[in-house]
């Protein structure tokens, strides 16, 4: 058995894909291209850049499949790619705005875990103060919440 001399780099990890089929065609979707997943009934709608895929697998399957350093389950019905979040709004649970403009609710019981995880994602430039008003710095922009 061969041992890796250096740790795997981020681009190698991001080459992992999920394969969806639709009307006889196969689509390979990179994890990084998935913006969020929404559960509706017994189906999961996977919103990727440029396309929406429907799967009969439940959201728990996607939660175990997608890397936890990139994705977070913010609600019973939502898993988000934290790199695709453009705004976080404070409230009882709060909400996130995704890069396509979709607003998704954060469950009140998942809020603190999400905020801690969101702040600690590797390679991000995010700062916030855990007070009543949150200030998030997302990439080049700053948002006051």
Image (cartoon, rainbow, N blue to C red):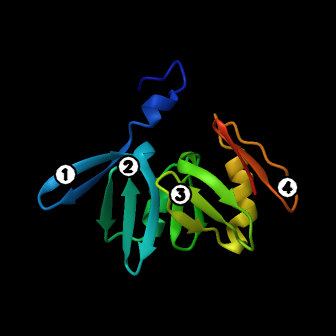
Instruction: Answer with the quarter of the image where residue 89 lies.
Output: bottom right
Asked if disc 4 and disc 2 are in contact, CB closer than 8 Å, the reply is: no
Percent coordinates x, y for residue 135 in the rendering: 78, 50
In what element is the residue under mark 3?
A: strand
* CA distance separating discs 1 and 3: 23 Å
Which residue bears the numbered disc 1?
26
Say if 135 sits above or below 78 in the image: above
- State the residue in front, 139 or 70: 139
Q: Which of marks 4 and 3 is nearer the N terminus?
A: 3
Which residue bears the numbered disc 2?
49
* CA distance separating discs 2 and 3: 13 Å
Near mark 2 (Cα within 10 A), the count class, few <14, some 14-19 or many ≥20, is: some
Q: Which of marks 2 and 1 is nearer the N terminus?
A: 1
* CA distance separating discs 4 and 1: 44 Å
Q: Which of marks 4 and 1 is nearer the N terminus?
A: 1
Which residue bears the numbered disc 3?
80
* CA distance separating discs 4 and 3: 21 Å
Which residue bears the numbered disc 4?
130
In what element is the residue under mark 4?
A: loop
* CA distance separating discs 4 and 2: 32 Å
- Extreme residue in the bottom direction: 41
Percent coordinates x, y for residue 29 in the rendering: 33, 47
In what element is the residue under mark 1?
A: strand
Q: Residue at x 51, y 27 (%)?
A: 9
Q: Which residue is drawn at 56% across and 45% down?
A: 83
């Amino acid at each position: 058995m061969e041992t890796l001399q250096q740790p795997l780099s981020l681009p190698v990890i991001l080459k992992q894909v999920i394969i969806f089929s639709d009307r006889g065609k196969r689509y390979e979707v990179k994890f990084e291209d998935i913006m969020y997943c929404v559960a509706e009934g017994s189906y999961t709608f996977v919103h990727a850049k440029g396309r929406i895929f429907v799967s009969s697998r439940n959201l728990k399957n996607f939660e175990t499949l997608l890397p936890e350093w990139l994705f977070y389950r913010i609600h019973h019905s939502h898993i988000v790619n934290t790199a695709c979040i453009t705004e976080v709004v404070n409230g009882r649970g709060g909400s996130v705005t995704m890069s396509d403009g979709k607003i998704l609710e954060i469950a009140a019981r998942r809020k603190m875990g999400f905020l801690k995880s969101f702040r600690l994602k590797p390679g991000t430039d995010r700062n916030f103060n855990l007070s009543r008003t949150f200030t998030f710095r997302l990439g080049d922009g700053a948002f006051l919440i």
